[in-house]
Image (cartoon, helix red, strand yellow):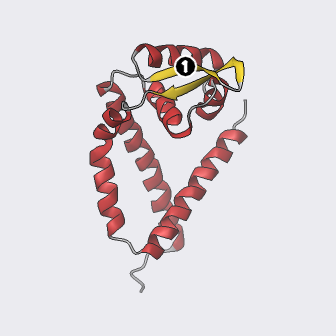
């Protein structure tokens, strides 16, 4: 009898692990947002702004999945707390662009440093070929999540 788990069993382990990972990352984000005195949704928006900004509030609304009225409150809180800047779009004076305040990202990264260090150590135990497979798998899972969101019934 083979000691290698069946494909079905491995698929179940992967699904369960992804669910647990999602929960643990949500808990980590919740703890980080508490330490930064932000709402978890505000932290998510700050992350999007940091990775994709500067961007318009409507683009941020689309990327975050939030309602436009909710986004106004998020941006007001982030601006008041000194996390973001709102500036006129140089290409369209009627439009506004949102960007992260330079230098503040280090505060966030410090709180994620334990997780980042752990991920680096875990990654070091894999070959480049294995990392390529893992990166592909995670990218495809992210894409599947985006599709699932788009397909949710109203």
**Front one among 90 and 84:** 90
**Front one among 81 and 130:** 81
Q: Residue at x 45, y 45 (%)?
A: 22
**Front one among 148 and 44:** 44
Q: Which residue is mark 1?
A: 86
The x and y percentages for residue 41 are 48, 26
Q: Quarter of the image containing the C terminus?
A: top right
The x and y percentages for residue 23 are 41, 42
**Above or below — where is 10 with respect to 152?**
below
> In the picture provided, is 97 more to the left or to the right than 44?
right
**Above or below — where is 124 with respect to 72?**
below
Q: Quadrant of residue 93?
A: top right
Q: Quarter of the image containing the N terminus?
A: bottom left
The x and y percentages for residue 42 are 47, 25
SS at circle 1: strand
**Above or below — where is 92 with respect to 138?**
above
**Above or below — where is 27 with respect to 117?**
above
The x and y percentages for residue 91 are 71, 26
């Amino acid at each position: 009898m083979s000691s290698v788990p069946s494909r079905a069993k491995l698929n179940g382990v992967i699904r369960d692990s992804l669910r647990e990972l999602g929960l643990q990352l949500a808990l980590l984000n919740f703890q980080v947002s508490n330490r930064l005195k932000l709402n978890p949704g505000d932290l998510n928006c700050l992350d999007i702004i940091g990775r994709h900004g500067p961007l318009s509030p409507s683009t941020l609304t689309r990327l975050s999945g939030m309602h436009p009225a909710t986004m106004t409150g998020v941006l007001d809180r982030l601006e008041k707390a000194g996390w973001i800047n709102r500036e006129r779009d140089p290409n369209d004076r009627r439009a506004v662009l949102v960007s992260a305040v330079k230098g503040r990202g280090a505060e966030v990264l410090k709180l994620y440093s334990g997780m980042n260090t752990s991920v680096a150590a875990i990654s070091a135990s894999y070959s480049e070929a294995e990392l390529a497979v893992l990166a592909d798998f995670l990218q495809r899972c992210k894409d599947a999540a985006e599709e699932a969101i788009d397909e949710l019934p109203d």
